[in-house]
Every structure is written in structure tokens, then in C-alpha cells.
Image (tube, grey):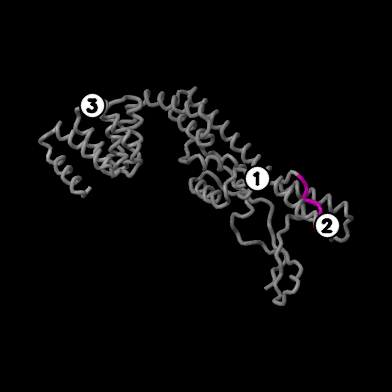
Amino acid sequence: MTPREDQALPENNFGKAPRLVRGVDIRSLPIGPEEAFVLSCVDGMTSQEDIASATGFDSDAVARVIRRLTELGAIEFEPMESVRVVPSERMPGNSSGAYRIRPTLEPSVAPSVHPTSIAPDSVEARRRALARKLGHSSAPPARFTTKSDAPESSLNFRAQEIKRQEQLATQARQQQLDRYLALANEAAAQHDLVSAVNSLRIACALAPEDASLARKLAGMQQRAAEENWEEYAERANYEVFEGRLAEAARSYEFAALGHPTWRFFERAAFCFLNSGGDLKRAGELAKRAVALSPDNPKCRLTLAQIYIAAKLKQSALAELERALALDPKQESIKETIRSVKRGEL
């Protein structure tokens, strides 16, 4: 069936620009660096395709982030120029009656007279105007005069376009970085150290090679932990009660950072281990607990369990023997030793 003139495309988000929902508090959104980076490019005028070009992300990743931000109520969609389908010429050699479909812009952009009645200079002027309308920094490339010119001109144009997109992505990242640094400074000035840490964490994700920024984040984390360790400890206890061990591990770690005690380090290590977290990080925390309380069998037992999970049999047996020496009546330790020796753990 031949499409009718001015038949609208099916309703979807293609050709629409996402925009921020009025009144949304960006700092309260539960989003990561990638989502924040995409969100910085949302202005109600830039399409998903152009956001992908500006950020350097592939279109599928941008679409995923856009869906996530929409679900969070952070953005909505604003229609851009309408895209319509008009019948074009019959495809050469096609006997099936199929037509090629080509999108056209609104009448204010499309020519109002037939192209054959326009002088060459006027056509070129329209081409340049259309290029500016679509956001290109220069007009479309001129027609090739010879076959030998075509490959070289095409490659040059592609190289220039790639360079332009890289520059746009770099500028967008720098704008994001400046924005989150400003938010961190503002939060620190208001003594909201937790918000300052969160903003600096995003900034570090945008510039992972910046060592000075990493040091600034570490310093801010230390300040926040020292002032809020009791709150972190209470939060960790509540998260354990609800079974959210991965979150409890982070809360106990922050509590230990601000108030170093064997209990906070041991609980952080235990929660990392039992939530399927990073065993290397869990081992480091358990060793800190042992260093603070070397005669505490609980600390050594937790470290031994981490060694067992990491398949480090000899290290596990050594810690289990030390724990048993500290608590000889503990039958569970004896049974764990026997299971490790039999290769059951």
C-alpha cells in the first residue's frame, strides 16, 4: 500500500527531545555518573540521537538511561519538528510498486516550490540553511566532480565529523565536571558533607585520571565519616535487620572510617562476605579488625571465613587454629577446621 501524503509516523519518542520535569530536585535522584552525565545534556531541544553524539555513549545506552530517568520522574518528552512521510519516486527496477520513504521537515523549512524551478545558488543556500537547522557546523559536502575526488572528500568529511563529536563529548564532560564540583563546594560550605561526598564521587567518575580530585574525595569522605559515624553505625544496624547486607557493609565501613573500632571493621568485612561482595575488600577490613583486636576470636574467625571463600586453604587453617587457641571450647571452630581439612569447604 502506498503511504498517503502527510501521513504521520506512529507515535513514539523518535524525533522528540527529553526535557527536565519542572520542579524536580536533581540532587535527590538515585542516579549514578552515567545517568547524571546524560541528564546534563537534557535541555528540551536536544534529541536522544544528539545526546548520544554529545556524550560519546552508544544510542542503546542513552535510550536505557532515558527510560530510567523517565521512570524516576526526572524527564519528559517535548516534540521537535514533525517528521512526516511523503510518497517519493518509484524505485528504479522495482516491479512490486514499493516506494521509497523520505522524512521531511515542517513547511517552514522545506522548499515551497519545486526544486527544478530554483536557481543553483538558491539550492545551495537552502542546503546550507538546512545544515545549520540540523546542528551541523558546516554545509553538506559539495557534489564530487570526479570519481577520484569522492573517496578522499568522503574520508575528510568523516574525519572532521568524528573530531567534532569528540570535541562535543569533551566539552559536555567538562561542563558536567564543573557542575558537580560546584555542587560539592556549595554543599561543603553549607556543612552538608554527605551531599558533598556524593557530588565529588560523581566528579571522580567523570575524571578518573585526576589524582588531585581523588584526594579531595578521600579527604571529604574522612570529614563526613568523623562527623557522622554514629549515624552510619545506626543505619548499618538497621540495614542488617532488614537483610540489606551490601548496604550495611558500606555503612559499617564509613562508621569505621570515622571511628576506628574492631567491631565496625569486623562487621563491614562480615557483611561484604555474606552479601557476595568484593572478597579482597572484605579481607582488608577483616585484617584491620584483627590488628585492632588480635586476641579476639571473632575477628580471626571472620578473616578465616573470607580465606575459605577465596579458596586459600592454608591461610584459612592458620586463622582457624589461632581462633581455636583463643577460644578452645568453641566446637563450631573445631568442626570448621575438620571440614576445611577434608576439603568440604
Residue 155 is situated, as x and y percent measured from the top left of the image, at: 72, 50
Q: Nearer the viewer, mark 1 or mark 2?
A: 2
Q: Which of marks 1 and 2 is nearer the N terminus?
A: 1
Label 1 crowd bin: few (<14), some (14–19), many (20+), radius 10 Å: some
The answer for how far apart the CA atoms under marks 1 and 2 are is 39 Å
Q: Do residues under tags 3 and 1 come within 8 Å of each other at their CB atoms?
A: no
| Left or right: residue 314 compared with residue 335 | right
Q: What stretch is highlighted in magenta?
A: 138-147
Name the amino acid type tagged 1.
Met
Name the amino acid type tagged 2.
Thr
The answer for how far apart the CA atoms under marks 3 and 1 are is 60 Å
- The residue tagged 2 is 146
Residue 285 is situated, as x and y percent measured from the top left of the image, at: 31, 33
Q: Which of marks 2 and 3 is nearer the N terminus?
A: 2
Q: Which residue is drawn at 31% across and 35% down?
A: 268
Name the amino acid type tagged 3.
Ser
- Which quadrant would residue 338 be assigned to in this image? top left
Residue 293 numbered tag: 3
Residue 251 is situated, as x and y percent measured from the top left of the image, at: 34, 34
Magenta region's main secondary structure?
loop
The answer for how far apart the CA atoms under marks 2 and 3 are is 82 Å
Residue 114 is situated, as x and y percent measured from the top left of the image, at: 84, 61
- Which quadrant would residue 42 be assigned to in this image? top right
Q: What element carries label 3?
A: loop
